[in-house]
Image (cartoon, helix red, strand yellow):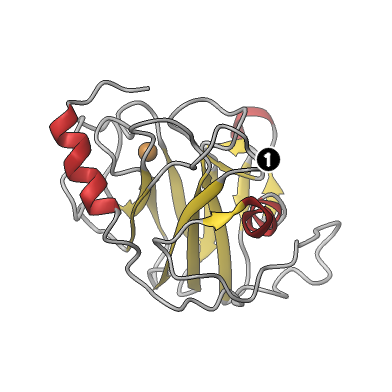
Amino acid sequence: MNRICKRMLAAVTALALTGGAASGIVLAAGMGNMGGMGGMKMGPMPKHLPKPGKPIHYTVARPLIKYSNSEGMLMGHGKHKSVMFMGHNIHMVIIAVEPGSPDQTFEIHKLVDPKLTVPAGANITLTILNMDYGPGMIHGVIIGKAQPPYKTVVPVPVPGQIAEIPLTMPRTAKSIKKSNYYFGTTTFKAPGTPGTYYYLCQMPGHAKAGMYGKFVVTP
Ligand SMILES: [Cu+2]
């Protein structure tokens, strides 16, 4: 729980409730990139999801969670683990505060704030699923050149911004299985030249508290 004033919370709540930037998303991109790659398994992606902004039940969210924990190739060891995405069409599902994870973090493959790598020029569909619980546990994601350390309020768009998913609300019930979940999706093209970017949460205080990771565009 981070300390933010009620007025700010009300403002970002209103912002969050305006919903995702995209509508009628077909979440079918990014399949099949890893065929034949050693030991990699991809979870089945739900082909259709409701419009972002409307919560989905756990039974609908579960395939997304599974996908988040299986898509991309785990690289490196220990603290230097990263998730490498390959191919021209990539779908990545990032979870905001998967239950059991530290506050104000992102998870992919159950790694906390891992480095993500994508090939230059790839078409990327990015989905965020907010699994956090409690007032103020609102999360979104922005990808750009802004580097840590971050101030409490990160002005958006950030320098070199390439993607944004508006803030999403926390889950609706304490019970993980009985809960509904908010998510958001965006599509963007990875820059055509290699470079280091960062993904971060735009909710005031979160990036400052560590809710960010490296997003590296590789040749
Ligand atoms: Cu956040």
| Tag count | 1
Query: Residue 47 appears at what percent x and percent y?
Result: 64, 76
Residue 212 seen in render: yes
Residue at image coords 54%, 78%: 26
Ligand 1 location (quadrant):
top left
Residue 129 appears left or right of 87: left
Above or below — where is 197 with respect to 113?
A: below
Tell me which residue sits at (80%, 58%) in the image: 40
Instruction: Give the labeled residue for mark 1.
Output: 76
Q: Position of residue 23 (x, y in %)?
A: 40, 75
Q: Quadrant of residue 201?
A: top left
| Residue 19 position (above or below residue 173) | below
Side of 166 relative to 14 (left or right): right
Secondary structure beneath label 1: loop
Q: Under 8 Å from ligand 1: the CB of mark 1?
A: no
Q: Nearer the viewer, residue 49 or 93?
A: 49
- From where the camera sits, is residue 154 visible? no
